[in-house]
Image (cartoon, rainbow, N blue to C red):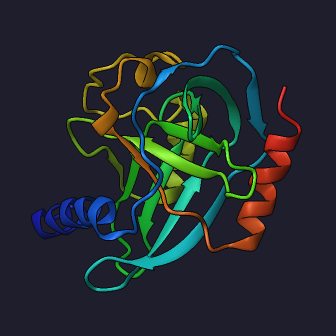
């Protein structure tokens, strides 16, 4: 990836966290009392325009088990294994950013569930969505940067600082929301 592409990607990721509307507060987190899980049967994603240049991004989450890890009065964070969250700047055809994270279920039943990611000390990327999908199948989205939190389910979020969790805005995609809600309804 060129230096300009890496710079754009870094700026875009920073703007993504700062340019979106404010999500619910991620504070006063405690370890989830129950270790129930959500099994997402398929990869799902949605597209949204955001940032200074109104860039079209695709935000996605990989299939797999998401285990209840942390909670607060606003909801529960279900952590996936490895780096199941991916972000693709569709308009620019540059690298896919991959992150640890999972599914957030709000306590308010009228609110929509969301995906969240956990900030790492570097930007982990894959040169294409196809390469990331292959990497996820082989190593749950292995990455060349060292993760400061460990690699087991719950370990990443369990030791994460509150300011390292980014809760995405609600998805505008009805199909994405239906699939996420269906997986949550079937949680074990």
Tell me where residue 12 appears, x and y as whole percent.
26, 67
Q: Residue furthest bottom?
A: 53
Q: Is residue 94 shown above or below 98?
A: below
Q: Residue at x 81, y 61 (%)?
A: 178
Nearer to me, 5 or 54: 54
Q: Dividing the image into 4 quarters, which one contains the N terminus?
A: bottom left
Residue 88: image x %, image y %?
Answer: 43, 65
Marker count (numbered): 0
Quarter location, residue 28: top left
Q: Residue at x 53, y 56 (%)?
A: 130
Residue at 61% x, 36% y is: 137
The residue located at (74%, 52%) in the rendering is 180
Residue found farthest to the right: 186
Q: In this picture, is 126 found above or below 48?
A: above
In the picture, residue 146 is in which quadrant? top left
Q: Nearer the viewer, residue 171 or 147?
A: 171
Q: Residue 138: percent from the left, percent from the top? A: 56, 31
The quarter of the picture where residue 112 lies is bottom right
Please state, as top left, top right, bottom left or bottom right, where the C terminus lies in the image.
top right
Along the line of sight, the residue nearer the viewer: 28 or 5: 28
Residue 72 drawn at (x, y percent): 53, 31
């Amino acid at each position: 990836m060129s230096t300009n592409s890496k710079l754009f990607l870094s700026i875009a990721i920073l703007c993504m966290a700062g340019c979106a509307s404010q999500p619910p507060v991620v504070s006063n987190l405690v370890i989830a009392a129950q270790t129930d899980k959500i099994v997402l049967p398929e990869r799902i994603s949605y597209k949204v325009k955001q940032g200074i240049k109104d860039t079209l991004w695709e935000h996605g989450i990989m299939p797999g088990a998401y285990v209840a890890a942390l909670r607060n009065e606003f909801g529960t964070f279900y952590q996936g294994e490895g780096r199941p969250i991916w972000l693709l700047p569709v308009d620019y055809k540059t690298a896919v950013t991959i992150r640890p994270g999972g599914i957030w279920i709000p306590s308010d039943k009228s609110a929509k569930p969301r995906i969240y990611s956990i900030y790492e000390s570097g930007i982990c990327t894959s040169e294409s969505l196809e390469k990331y999908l292959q990497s996820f199948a082989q190593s749950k989205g292995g990455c060349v940067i060292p993760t400061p939190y460990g690699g087991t389910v719950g370990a990443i979020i369990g030791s994460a600082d509150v300011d390292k969790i980014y809760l995405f805005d609600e998805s505008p995609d009805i199909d994405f929301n239906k699939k996420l809600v269906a997986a949550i309804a079937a949680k074990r």
